[in-house]
Amino acid sequence: MEGLKLELLAGHGGLSRKVKVPALSKPGLEFAGMMEFYENDRIQIIGSKEAAFFHSLSEEVQEERVKGLFEKDAPAYIFSKNVDIPDLFLHYGDIYNIPILKSFYKTSSLFSELYAFLQAALAERTSMHGVLLDINGVGVLVTGKSGLGKSEVALELIRRGYILVADDVVEVYQIEKGLLIGEAPEVLKQYLEIRGVGIVNVVYLYGVKAYREKKRISLIVELQMWEDNSQKYDRLGLKTDKRKIFDTYVSYAALPITEARNAATLVEAAAYDFKSKSMGYNSANEFENKLNKEIKKNQENGHDEEDN
């Protein structure tokens, strides 16, 4: 509760209650007696407006409304910074074992912070093998078979000033369709495994600027060993590949690597190319247009010579 700045004041026995819905609710209508609209599966937020209306009610009505709320068994009640918690809530919180919490955020900030937290905590998750980096603002998930040097690529990119998010295991969850977030498991945060060196803490080696907690995944880059050109690759970059994770399609690029090719530079180039495309500039399309113009020009010159 430290990160959300919450203090538990009553209902200590209800801390094991499960929250299954990331949405939040304000019980303003319920204070007015309209219990048929009560969304009791959500955490209830009580701000200054709700509190002011509640205190305008008679003591008898207050008792009736609060008891009615607690009988519906909501997960928890959270009061914002400038709200004094009525004794009735503390009393019934202990009786029904429903947590009563005090926030040090104002209502709007509390709503946004808690909603973001619940969205991440309750989202469906999957684990992927790879390295997640922030390369000039682009979240790049580097994948590939074991032994291809993904962590070594990450180390070189960190040395160039880019940012590590997760190494080896990347936990991926979807906030909403089109928005995937990746982060490291708790035990692996800030760590990078380098064969022959061991586990290194990138924050200790390169400073806090070398690490971030989570990052939106915008591009998947798969490192592949180039074996006698047995696999065909898009030499111009005109083809747009994507990979589906949950309901989200993510841009994908396969990078063939050999001992002669600098894998870190290739990943960096892929990230910069993705960013330029997202900003409206496509090198491959520009080249194709120039090439087509040149071909058309040569054909026209050829026809002119035949006519002469």
Image (cartoon, rainbow, N blue to C red):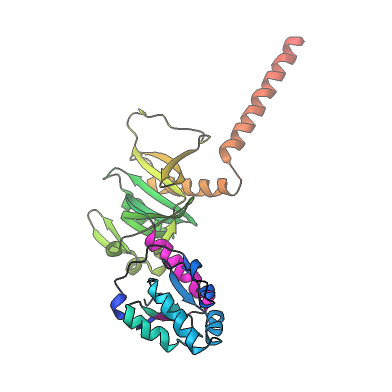
Give the answer, above or below, for where 120 lies relative to 73: above
Image height check: is 116 above or below 236?
A: below
**103 within the magenta span:** yes
**Residue 15 position in % (x across, y down):** 31, 74
Residue 255 shown left or right of residue 13 in the figure: right
Residue drawn at (42%, 43%), measured in percent from left and top? 244
Image x and y of residue 249, in percent: 46, 44
What kind of secondary structure does the magenta stretch mostly adopt?
helix
Quadrant where the image shows the N terminus? bottom left
> Where is residue 10 drawn, in percent x and y?
35, 83
Pick out the residue farthest to the right.
308
Using the rendered image of the protein, determine whether residue 104 is visible from the camera's viewpoint. Answer: no
Query: Magenta includes 281?
Result: no
Where is residue 96? Give x, y as percent: 33, 78
Magenta region, residue range: 101-123
Q: Is residue 76 left or right of residue 33?
A: left
Front residue (pair 241, 76): 76
In this view, the residue in front, 9 or 113, is 9
Q: Residue at x 29, y 71 (%)?
A: 16
**Does 10 appear above or below 247?**
below
Residue drawn at the location 47% of the way across and 75% of the way down: 45
Placement of 9 over or under 70, stated as above or below: below
> Which quadrant would residue 284 be assigned to in this image?
top right
Residue 98 in view of the camera: yes
**Left or right relative to 99: residue 38:** right
Residue occupying the point 34% across, 64% down: 202
Q: Quadrant of residue 91?
A: bottom left
Residue 26 or residue 286, whichever sits in front: 26
